[in-house]
Image: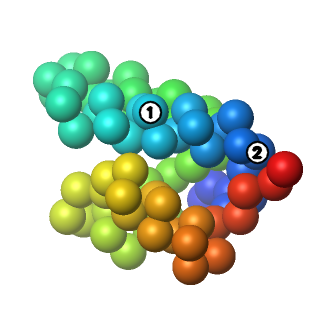
Amino acid sequence: MKGRDRFTQAESTAICTALETLRRAERPAQKSIRESLRQSGFYISDWPRAATGFTRSDFEDLVRLRHIRIAG
């Protein structure tokens, strides 16, 4: 795993917002969104659904299954 699996509530909210934006963005904008996710410690490639297009719902499932922990 390159990234983290523990995030604050604020980081979690930012990740969810970025994931929603990522799916609607044009290709050049997607690159900068993915970079901002990596800067927060979240790497889409760390998770199994990455190959099929990781979504906010996928992130929320990982939180629900406790693969990703949210502090606070």
Disc 1 marks a residue whose amino acid type is Thr
Q: Which residue is mark 1?
A: 17
Q: Is residue 12 left or right of residue 31?
A: right
Compared to residue 28, the image places residue 70 above or below, namely below
Q: Is residue 64 visible?
A: yes
Looking at the picture, tell me which residue is in the foreground, 34 or 66: 66
Find residue 42 and name its label.
none
Q: Residue furthest bottom?
A: 65
* Label 1: how many Cα within 10 Å (few below 14, some 14–19, many 20+): few
Q: Which residue is mark 2?
A: 8
Q: Tell me where residue 18 appears, x and y as whole percent.
A: 42, 33
* SS category of the residue bearing label 1: helix
Disc 2 marks a residue whose amino acid type is Thr
Which image quarter: residue 8? top right
**Sequence-first tag of 1 and 2:** 2
Which residue corresponds to the image point at 61% horizontal and 59% vertical from the top-left? 2
Which residue corresponds to the image point at 70% horizontal and 35% vertical from the top-left? 10
Which residue corresponds to the image point at 20% horizontal and 64% vertical from the top-left? 52
Q: How is the image coloured?
A: rainbow
Compared to residue 64, the image places residue 37 above or below, namely above
* SS category of the residue bearing label 2: strand
Q: Is residue 56 left or right of residue 2?
A: left
Compared to residue 14, the image places residue 28 above or below, namely above
Q: CA distance from mark 1 to mark 2?
A: 14 Å
Q: Residue furthest right?
A: 72
Q: Is residue 23 left or right of residue 11?
A: left
Q: Tell me where residue 45 appears, x and y as whole percent.
A: 42, 60
Q: Is residue 6 left or right of residue 37?
A: right
Q: Tell me where residue 21 appears, x and y as whole percent.
A: 31, 29
Looking at the picture, tell me which residue is in the foreground, 43 or 57: 57
Which residue corresponds to the image point at 23% horizontal and 56% vertical from the top-left? 53
Q: Residue furthest left?
A: 26
